[in-house]
Image: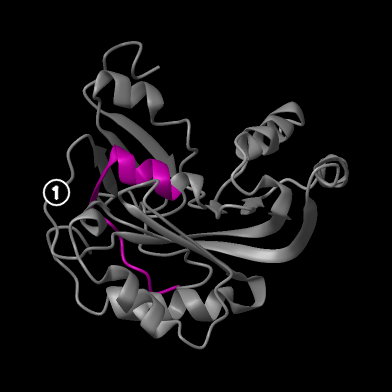
Amino acid sequence: MGAGINAEEIQIWTDVDGMLTADPRIIPSGHRVKSISFAEASEMAYFGAKVLHPATVLPAVEKNIPVRILNSRRADINGTIITSEPVPCRNPVKSISCKRGITILNIHSTRMLMAHGFLRRIFELFDRYGTSVDMVSTSEVSVSLTIDNRENLDAICRELREFAEASSEDGQAIICLIGENIRHTPGIAGRAFQVLQKKNIRMISQGASLLNLGFVVSENELEGAVAALHEEFFSELDPAVFD
């Protein structure tokens, strides 16, 4: 509606103060993010931030209309403003998002060494079953990927086994460090994995999105991992961006 009438600002009134540095169910003392970009907000929403649906910002992006997240129970709080251009920030990470209920699917086939079409065959299968893939990690003969919808998993695995070995692991979770400065700041991955050196990291993804460093851990390690990362990246805050 806001895009349709060319509004100056679109406001979403909810039950939290805005976008936060982490899931408040894991980090109750998380900080409000005053300003983020549309790209950052979309990544946060897709990877677990419940305050905003991933598709919500699309009409606003197309019309370049700012979106503000506000708390209907605390109307005096300025919330979070989402704009096309991010405010300069000293913190490389704006938020830590997480997504539970993830399944890892491991696919391996030595027959595909130096053969083209392996990935196409895999993803055509997921397309046919209407199953979205969140993260992907590949080598010449192996592919690991994550899904959050197990509805067609048995059928998918059955067809995969016609040309590859396939196994699945339930009870996993995705953790994402999100921020525009990740693309410009060296050493972010090193800092993250240093504080998680005692955690078993199952998959890593960086590069597909220049503002997202994502990895997979077991669900039972999720809360400890998020707490360690939050302490590492938000012990000092840029007051222009965080409250």
Q: Residue at x 65, y 71 (%)?
A: 219
Q: Residue at x 47, y 63 (%)?
A: 23
Q: Residue at x 29, y 74 (%)?
A: 233
Residue 40, can we see it?
Answer: yes
Quadrant of the drawing holding the C terminus: bottom left
| Residue type for callout 1 | Val
On the image, the x and y values in percent for residue 7 come to 26, 19
On the image, the x and y values in percent for residue 188 come to 28, 69
Q: Is residue 8 above or below residue 185?
A: above
Instruction: Using the image as rendered, state which of residue 156 and residue 86 is in the foreground.
Output: 156
Q: Is residue 66 left or right of residue 176?
A: left
Residue 109, can we see it?
Answer: no
On the image, the x and y values in percent for residue 169 come to 75, 64
Q: Is residue 41 magenta?
A: yes
Q: Is residue 154 left or right of residue 37?
A: right
Dot 1: element: loop
Q: Residue furthest top?
A: 5
On the image, the x and y values in percent for residue 227 come to 45, 79
Q: Is residue 168 magenta?
A: no
Read off the magenta span.
Answer: 28-44
Q: Residue at x 63, y 53 (%)?
A: 141
Instruction: Using the image as rendered, state which of residue 2 and residue 196 is in the foreground.
Output: 196
The residue that label 1 is drawn on is 87
Q: Is residue 132 left or right of residue 207?
A: right
Quadrant of the drawing holding the N terminus: top left
Instruction: Using the image as rendered, state which of residue 33 and residue 136 is in the foreground.
Output: 136
